[in-house]
Image: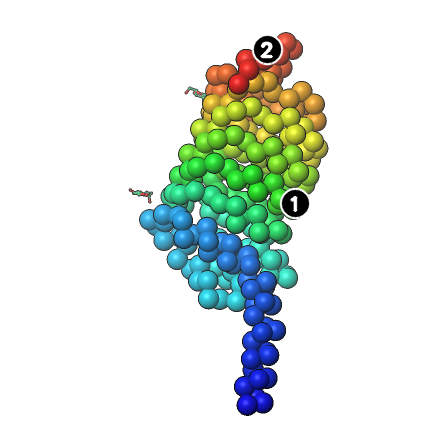
Amino acid sequence: MASFLLSSLFLLLAAPLAISTNSEGEALHALRTRLSDPRGVLQSWDPTLVNPCTWFHVTCDNHNHVIRLDLGNSNISGPLGPELSQLKHLQYLELYKNNFEGTIPEELGDLKNLVSIDLYDNNLHGSIPKSFGKLKTLRFMRLNNNKLTGSIPKELAKLSNLKVFDVSNNDLCGTIPVDGPFPTFSFQSFENNSRLNGPELQGLVAYDFGC
Ligand SMILES: *[C@@H]1O[C@H](CO)[C@@H](O)[C@H](O)[C@H]1NC(C)=O
Ligand SMILES: *[C@@H]1O[C@H](CO)[C@@H](O)[C@H](O)[C@H]1NC(C)=O
């Protein structure tokens, strides 16, 4: 009886701990359940392991926190989801050249440590989240070759570390922001958005086509 009580107590204490250490694995597993993966690149994603650090295409730091997700060029299709925002330590989100569809989750703006977000060459639609203005450490944002609509959020002008920005080949509209890092980007970053305008595309006069 005493040992039963003791082990029940242990389970009670250990259960929340186990959940919190593997919340990143659970977030990735939740993403996986929605995806179609004809090449089996996510086969090693075993949710019963104590953390996702041994899964292929996932990289952790010394504290077993996920810092990279490398799924570029993997022929994956399906929607992204808000769970990705639970990868609080993520620095590199590399999902380019797949068939990810649906919208870009607003919650990705909570990834405070993100250095690079590469979603280019997918089937994403909807708008660029305003919440991306919170990604203060971001250096690379490539969203080109999707079906994104709406305007470039003026909040992105706050991203003072942004070195590479590409939204070419979408269906964006409105005016390109003129402040923050935007004057350093060339017209190629904005090409092939027929309703987008701004100094990079049209000399110094910005025409607002509206959205
Ligand atoms: C990608 O997946 C589709 C099915 O979704 C399949 O028809 C195609 O052959 C795959 N391509 C590669 C390069 O694996
Ligand atoms: C824009 O579209 C043209 C014609 O389809 C293409 O040749 C060009 O490479 C595209 N620009 C970019 C930056 O992808």
At which x and y percent is residue 50? 52, 67
- The crowding category of the residue bearing disc 1, from other C-alpha atoms within 10 Å (few below 14, some 14 to 19, many at least 20), is some
Pinpoint residue 74: horizontal percent, then vertical percent. Answer: 41, 45
Query: Percent from the top left, x then y, of residue 153?
Result: 61, 27
Q: What residue is shown at x 60% (from left), y 32% (from top)?
A: 130
Label at residue 112: 1
- The image position of residue 140, as x and y in percent, is 60, 36
Crowdedness near tag 2: few (<14), some (14–19) or many (≥20) residues, C-alpha within 10 Å: some
Q: Looking at the picture, which amino acid does disc 1 mark?
A: Lys
Judge left or right: residue 91 versus residue 26: right
Q: Nearer the viewer, residue 103 or 186?
A: 103
- SS assignment at label 1: loop
Q: Which residue is nearer to you in this view: 3 or 168? A: 3
Q: Residue furthest bottom?
A: 1
The circle drawn on residue 126 is none
- In this view of the protein, can residue 192 be seen by the observer? yes
Which disc is residue 207 wearing? 2
Disc 1 within 8 angstroms of ligand 2 (CB): no
Task: Residue at 48%, 59% (x, y): give it.
Answer: 55
The CA span between labels 2 and 1 is: 34 Å
Q: Could you say which quadrant of the image residue 207 lies in?
A: top right
- Please report whichever mark, 2 or 1, sits nearer to the chain's N-terminal start: 1
Q: Report ligand 1 position as a quadrant.
A: top left
Q: Is residue 53 in sight in this rendering?
A: no
> Is 109 above or below relative to 209?
below
Kind of residue sitting beneath label 2: Tyr
The residue lying at 48 percent from left, 31 percent from top is 126
Which residue is found at the position 51% from the left and 43% from the top? 94
Observer-nearest residue: 94 or 102?
Answer: 102
In contact (CB < 8 Å): disc 2 and disc 1: no
Question: Which quarter shows the N terminus?
Answer: bottom right
